[in-house]
Amino acid sequence: MDDLNVSYGNVRAVRGVSLAAAPGRVTLVLGPNGAGKTTTLRAVAGLHPPVGGRVVLDGADVTGRAAHVLVRRGLALVPEGRRIFGPLTVEENLRLGAYLAAKAEFEERRERVYTLFPVLAERRHGPGALLSGGEQQMLAFARALMSGPKVMLLDEPSMGLAPTMVDTVFDQVRAIADTGVAVVAVEQNADAALEIADEVAVLDRGEVVFCGSAADARSQGSVVRAFLGEAALAEPGRTAITPPDLG
Ligand code: ATP
C-alpha cells in the first residue's frame, strides 16, 4: 500500500501509510489502541474504501476494489475475533473458505491445511464451536488458506488466547509465511510477534512512526518499545523515521 488515507466521515483514521508485503515474509504492524491498524487492513481488503493512496496487488492497482474481487485475486483477511462458524463442522468451515475452488482444488488445499494443522484433521467432523480458542484461530487461518491466497492479512491473531497458546499461534503464522504467502499481521503482543516477523512497522494516530527489520527491532528491543511507549505520548505530527522500501 502506498500513501494510504482512510476516513470515517470527517475523521482521518489512516494518514499516508505505506507498507510492503512480500511472499514468504511476515510484516508485523504494531501500535496502540486506535492507531489505525484494523482500519488499514479493512481498507486493503476492500471493506472500507480509502480516500487516497493506492493498494497494489501483484503489480496491479486494486485500490477500492470490492472484497469478493480481492479474494479472487489472492487476498484473504482473517478478522479480529476469528469469526468462525460455530455450529458448522471444521470441514464445513473449510468448504466455505474455498467457495471459489473446484472440487480437486478444494481437496488438495484441504489436505495441505490438514498437514499444517493436524489437530483440525482430527476434529474435522466436530463443530467449530467446540474447538479451544487456539484451535479456532487455527481454523480461521485454515479457512483463509482455503481460498489459495497470495497475501494474508491477520488482525490480532493472538487476541484472547491463553498465554500458553500465543507462541504456538505465532509459530503457525511463521509456517504460513514459509509456504510462500505474504503475511501482514496486526498485533498488540509485540514481543512474541517480533520473534517470528521479518519486517515491522509501528503505527500511531494513523501514521507510520517506525519502520524497519524485525531483526533490528529485536536486537534493539528498546527502540520499538520506545516507539510504542512514545507513541502513546507523542505530539501529533512527530513522525518520520525510515520510509518503507516498496521495492
Ligand atoms: P485497536 O487495537 O483498538 O483495534 P486499531 O489500531 O486497530 O485499534 P482502528 O480500529 O483502526 O485502530 O481505529 C482507528 C481510529 O478510527 C480510532 O480513532 C477509532 O476510534 C476510529 N474508528 C474505528 N472504527 C470506526 C468507525 N466505524 N467509525 C468511526 N470511527 C472509527
Image (cartoon, rainbow, N blue to C red):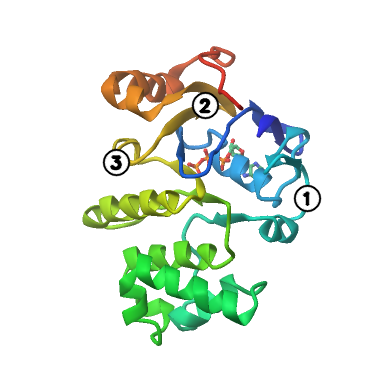
180 in relation to 51, above or below:
below
Kindly report the distance in space between the C-alpha atoms of the residues bearing marks 3 and 2.
20 Å
- The amino acid type, in three-letter code, at marker 3 is Ala
- Judging depth in this view, the residue of 96 and 134 nearest the camera is 96
- The amino acid type, in three-letter code, at marker 1 is Arg
Residue 64 image point, x, y percent: 78, 45
Which numbered disc, 3 or 2, marks the residue closer to the eye? 3
242 in relation to 87, above or below:
above
Q: Quadrant of residue 137?
A: bottom left
- Local packing at callout 2 (Cα closer than 10 Å; few below 14, some 14-19, many 20+) is many
* Ligand 1 shown in quarter: top right
Seen at 51% across and 50% down, the residue is: 181
Which numbered disc, 1 or 2, marks the residue closer to the eye? 1
Residue 76 image point, x, y percent: 59, 56
Residue 54 image point, x, y percent: 74, 34
Q: Which residue is mark 2?
A: 204
Q: In the image, is 128 to the left or to the right of 244? A: left
